[in-house]
Amino acid sequence: MSNPSDTPAPQPAAPAARSHGRKSISATLRPRVLMGEAPRLARVWTARIITLFPEAFPGVLGESLTGKALKEEAWALETIDLRPYGIGKHKNVDDTPAGGGAGMVIRADVLGPAIDEALARAKGRTRLIYLSPRGRRFDQAMARDWAAGGGVTLICGRFEGIDERVIEEYRIEEVSLGDFVLTGGEIAAQAMLDATVRLLPGVLGNAESIEDESHSAGLLEHPQYTRPAEWKGRAIPPVLMSGHHGKIAQWRLATAEDITRQRRPDMWADYQNRED
Ligand SMILES: C[S@@+](CC[C@H](N)C(=O)[O-])C[C@H]1O[C@@H](n2cnc3c(N)ncnc32)[C@H](O)[C@@H]1O
């Protein structure tokens, strides 16, 4: 491949990096410095995002319960902007695919140094993930697994993706949001982080709601209702208005089982074979 800017990547003097949600901290400071200044943050579950679009974060994660928890430092979010690692005057991050074909591929000598920076900051408390439609499909078990660790470093691809040698060199896990192709990894990152962060201690107000919800106990959730008691001629199932907790629990379990059996035979089979 010929590229006029095909020279060794210069080390960026101060790659743009942002930490989100820390109340009194300037976004222009580098997170490593911030961690040094506030040691208690160093142990906080941290998501690091390598992206060409750092301004897309925290995005929807800055709202509601995840946003409140971010401000309260129940978790931390740092973005690592890939652009300053780019090559030449124009900070190119991509090049044409070896062997020809459409699109562009993110260069190994650009992404590598950004990963090194993320790993140096994480001090071993992270797992390295490339968001990719080729990856293992993300699910609730993976969210639990991620939440149980010290944090994650998510690489958001763009264009045709990233040079395969980076995946091999850093032994990166590939994880997919689903069997479809997005334009970039940023939306997938936010979806997976939302599912993970809500499992961290102190993020959800009512911990019980996690135990009952879809995919937690191997079942889809029972139907939910609220006021008014009647709407467009449709009444709330009388058992839910009875105040009888035992019967309500029975009804919820039975409807959760029905819905799972009808909609997800795969989950239903696993549920029936579970060992209690
Ligand atoms: C247009 S896609 C590249 C698709 C790639 N050429 C392929 O066919 O597998 C650009 C980037 O979006 C992200 N992406 C696309 N679909 C995704 C999915 N289902 N799950 C997670 N990330 C996805 C990845 O980071 C990917 O590198």
Image: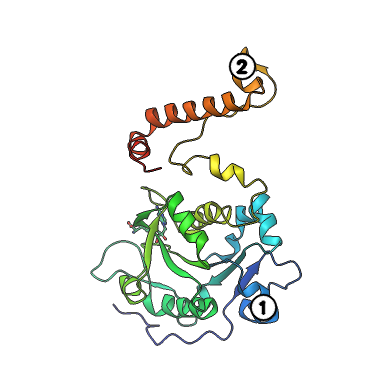
Q: Where ligand 1 lies, by quadrant?
A: bottom left
**183 w.r.t. 234: above or below:** below
* Closer-to-camera residue (225/112): 225
**219 w.r.t. 239: above or below:** below
* Closer-to-camera residue (257/78): 257
In the picture of the structure, the residue carrying the numbered disc 1 is 39
| Residue 3 locus on image (x, y percent) | 35, 80
Q: Earlier in the sequence, mark 2 or mark 1?
A: 1
Label 1 CA crowd tier, 10 Å (few <14, some 14–19, many 20+): few
Which quadrant of the figure contains the C terminus? top left
User: Can residue 49 be seen at all in this image of the molecule?
Assistant: no
User: How many numbered callouts?
Assistant: 2
* Closer-to-camera residue (117/267): 267
Say which mark, if any, is on residue 234: none
In the picture of the structure, the residue carrying the numbered disc 2 is 238
Residue 70: quarter of image: bottom right
**215 w.r.t. 184: above or below:** above
Q: Give the amino acid type for the residue marked by disc 2 in the picture.
A: Pro
Q: Give the amino acid type for the residue marked by disc 1 in the picture.
A: Pro
Query: Under tag 1, what secondary structure?
Result: helix
Residue 32: quarter of image: bottom right
